[in-house]
Amino acid sequence: MAGAAGRVGSAVVVGASMAGIFAAAALAQSGYQVTVLERDRLPSTARSRRGVPQGEQAHVLLHRGLVTIDELLPGFRAGLLSRGAMPFDTGQMPWLGEFGWLDTSVPAFEVVSATRPLMEAVARERLLELPMVSVRDDVTVSGLVADRRGWRARTAAGEFTSDIVVDASGRSSRLEHWLPGLGRPRVEQVDAQMGYACRLYAERVPTPLRAGVMILNSPMVGTAGLALPVEGDRWLVAAAGFGDKRPPRDEIAFERFLADLPDPGITDLVSLLDPAGPVRIYRQTANQRRRWDRCDGWPRGLLVVGDALCAFNPVYGQGITVAAQQASAIRAALGVGKPIDRLLQRQMIRITDTPWSMATTADLRHPSCPGHLNAGQRLSFAWASRLGRLAAAGDVRCTRSLAAVNHLMVSPVALFHPALVGRVARPIPRRRISRPRVLEDLSQARSSASRRPPPAAPTDA
Ligand SMILES: Cc1cc2nc3c(=O)[nH]c(=O)nc-3n(C[C@H](O)[C@H](O)[C@H](O)COP(=O)(O)OP(=O)(O)OC[C@H]3O[C@@H](n4cnc5c(N)ncnc54)[C@H](O)[C@@H]3O)c2cc1C
């Protein structure tokens, strides 16, 4: 598909992180000559960088995101796998939710688990294979000007002219300062005051676990833990907490936080690993949406995508997938001859509607989150809770449907399918799914490892 449309114009994309890469791919495949301008000096390997401070935190790429990115940038999935990323079915992942364990024998959706820098490096490599793309790093955009001839992006390296401009500069986008004539967008914000802490570990002894672990508490408790296998026989172990339960940076306190989770699975795992870096914390996690769709006089040739438009509480793992869906929509619109205009910008925000509603409804339940659920949100939450209880009682249909919604594979409307309505109407069985066997194996592995004599001290030659 690349370049199949012939050159139709020029585009500048501000920001070469995930949203910028995807938008650039969509534009290049639609016939635009694309220049991506990035403030950071981009690493030649999969390393974290200043402009993406969240890069050291655990990132899950939902199945919808994996599929969409692989369509936009063919070879993305294979590229991750060839660099050691770990594929697994999230149905096999031991998952302790608010209502109990989920059944690990019910398949769900594939994820390919990797560090965030590896995801970005592989996506960037695929982008650079497209003929009409160039990435200029170490170039900071300081302003935008629109006139009858098109757009000019101001930088210290000179002005870059183009027919269209895409702002993919992330949560701290300065678009409203660059284009004061647009006015200030209304900013929607739902902040549950969630904090993340994450530490990279290396496998010291092989673990029986292949698919990560997720331990969630109820919102009233407000803590959670996640362990993900990533490339290089390493694990990313993340802790999350709301309000005054935010996890600490201190290494001993971090492990104590994990030990206080309602299941010892992650602590058992950590005992088989060696730390491979410090604990990194991250606290800018509010859901934030800039309603550019409601501004009058939106200029032709301008789009805002990714976190610059809508950033989510990361705990739901939606941001990269939404950015990919937006790029896919841009490509589809350009493919049928639609212009880059206010209507397309509206479509960008419509793509955020479902994940926004899912994330904010869940966050508003937390005592640390100012605001209240409205009647519709209370209803949808009550419905989803009922399905969650059924899933924890072993109902396969409910388990699969909830997974499909969480991976953004289907709309939450699917949760009102007649087959589910029938189940919700009946009493919930008392049966509960038991703790996954693999976690018992993990405890065993921990006991055996602690009985093993420590490695012999090196002797002087
Ligand atoms: C702690 C945490 C965990 C997360 N976990 C997940 C997860 O599990 N799954 C998931 O899908 N998403 C997750 N996300 C969200 C995900 O990181 C973002 O949605 C994703 O990176 C897309 O962001 P973006 O490209 O829009 O912006 P960013 O990643 O913020 O990138 C913006 C880019 O623009 C550049 N830039 C900024 N200003 C300028 C300028 N003036 N000139 C030139 N360049 C500029 C920056 O250097 C940067 O490269 C998480 C986020 C956080 C904070």
Image (tube, rainbow, N blue to C red):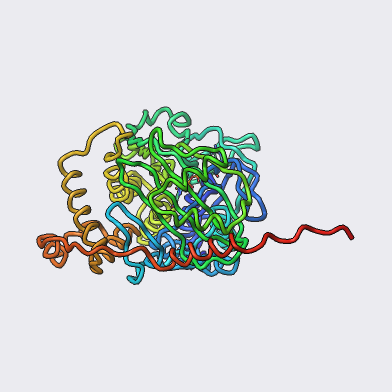
Question: Looking at the picture, does residue 304 appear above or below residue 80?
Answer: above
Q: Nearer the viewer, residue 448 or 310?
A: 448
User: Which residue is depicted at the point 60% across and 61% down?
Assistant: 203
User: Which residue is depicted at the point 63% across and 46% down?
Assistant: 137
Q: Is residue 14 visible?
A: no
Q: Is residue 158 visible?
A: yes
Q: Is residue 370 left or right of residue 215?
A: left
Q: Residue furthest right?
A: 461
Q: Position of residue 129 (x, y in %)?
A: 59, 63
Q: Nearer the viewer, residue 449 or 326?
A: 449
Q: Is residue 411 left or right of residue 310?
A: left
Q: Is residue 461 left or right of residue 137?
A: right
User: Which residue is depicted at the point 46% across and 28% down?
Assistant: 177
Q: Nearer the viewer, residue 244 or 264?
A: 264
Residue 30 placement: quadrant: bottom left
Question: Looking at the picture, does residue 8 appear above or below residue 303?
Answer: below
Q: Position of residue 295 (x, y in %)?
A: 32, 34
Q: Position of residue 425 (x, y in %)?
A: 10, 60
